Image: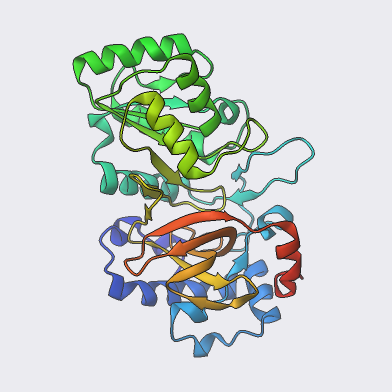
Amino acid sequence: MNGETWNMEDLKDLAPANFFSKALALMQHQAKNNAVYSEWVQSMKAQLDKVKSLEQIPFLPIHFFKTHAIYTGRECPKFHFESSGTTQDIVSKHFVKDLSVYEQSFMQCFEQFYGAPKDYCVLGLLPNYLERQHSSLVYMTDHLIQASKDERSGFYLYDFEKLNHTLAILEKEQQKTLLIGVSFALMDFVDAYPQKLNHTIVMETGGMKGRKQELTKPALHGYLADGFGIESIHSEYGMTELLSQAYSKGAGIYACPPWMKVLVADESDPTALTTTGRGVLHIIDLANVNSCAFIATEDIGMVHPDGTFEVIGRLDQSARRGCSLLVV
């Protein structure tokens, strides 16, 4: 198999029973054709011919995206997405060979959880992301805005007055609306314009670091829910290193599309993986066909028996340094 024959449409209705065979085929392909992943597999002394379950698959530590060009194939793709960060930070880069794979992934995923984008007015409140290039979140939101076909859809940057006026009109028309924004911008907006929303989904995408006093997810969601007069805040779980997203419709419980699965590793032993329980989140994203589909994140979470998951926190630097197996 290869990227050219990997059709996201075929994965839209991927049955759970068939996930392992797809993941196994992709693992073998990337172990042969992805130089960084191949070297990692060898350093872990993984015996790929003996992999009989998802828990036995070798996962690449996510911080490698900050230090290496991760791609499957002979040539490094020219296009890449880039994580946010200050000028002093080393940012992650996700090299993307085929943007249509990403587009199919986020469109199919959105439709699965929310229906057709054309039925929504999509309002983007992503100021710090719009101010830099190579944001996968801006790329996705821009395509959802275009697909919505509503002339009022768009990015609102810092124009809170215009956003408030637009929301008032949409609410009066009872137009189904998605307000997607980074946490600090949503907080700033609701501080300036508290209101009661009846026809709008408010979706936060994270993004508090360094901008406001950081809140726990429950506290953040409670604050926003009170300010917008709604029962629950939705969330998008995505990252630069993934071409797929998981969505939460409330209570911080995320669900994955059929081509994405989350496992957990013991915090003291990154090779001890299970499909349920608490630990470091490890993600299989079959849309990452041309980079690396098997990523060990730095998020601590809980995976439930039905495959949904929660994000509890982050590995601190001392914890990561303590995982000597993750350092090469």
Q: Camera-side residue: 34 or 164?
A: 164
Q: Camera-side residue: 136 or 202?
A: 202
Visual colour scheme:
rainbow
Q: Can residue 282 be seen in this view?
A: yes
Query: Where on the picture, by quarter, is residue 212?
Result: top right
Query: Where on the picture, by quarter, is residue 149?
Result: top left
- Quadrant containing the C terminus is bottom right
Percent position (x, y) of residue 274? Answer: 47, 76
Q: Vertically, is 178 above or below 163?
A: below
Percent position (x, y) of residue 233? Answer: 37, 37
Number of numbered callouts drawn? 0
Q: Vertically, is 300 above or below 33?
A: above
Q: Camera-side residue: 110 or 270?
A: 270
Q: Residue at position x 67%, y 80% from top?
A: 44
Residue reaching furthest left? 174
Percent position (x, y) of residue 183? Answer: 51, 33
Q: Residue at position x 27%, y 41% from top?
A: 114
| Left or right, 284 with reference to 300 | left
Q: Vertically, is 147 above or below 156?
A: below
Q: Residue at position x 58%, y 88% from top?
A: 47
Q: Residue at position x 61%, y 84% from top?
A: 46
Q: Vertically, is 5 above or below 46?
A: above
- Quadrant containing the N terminus is bottom left
Percent position (x, y) of residue 232? Answer: 33, 38
Residue reaching furthest right? 88
Q: Is residue 142 visible?
A: no
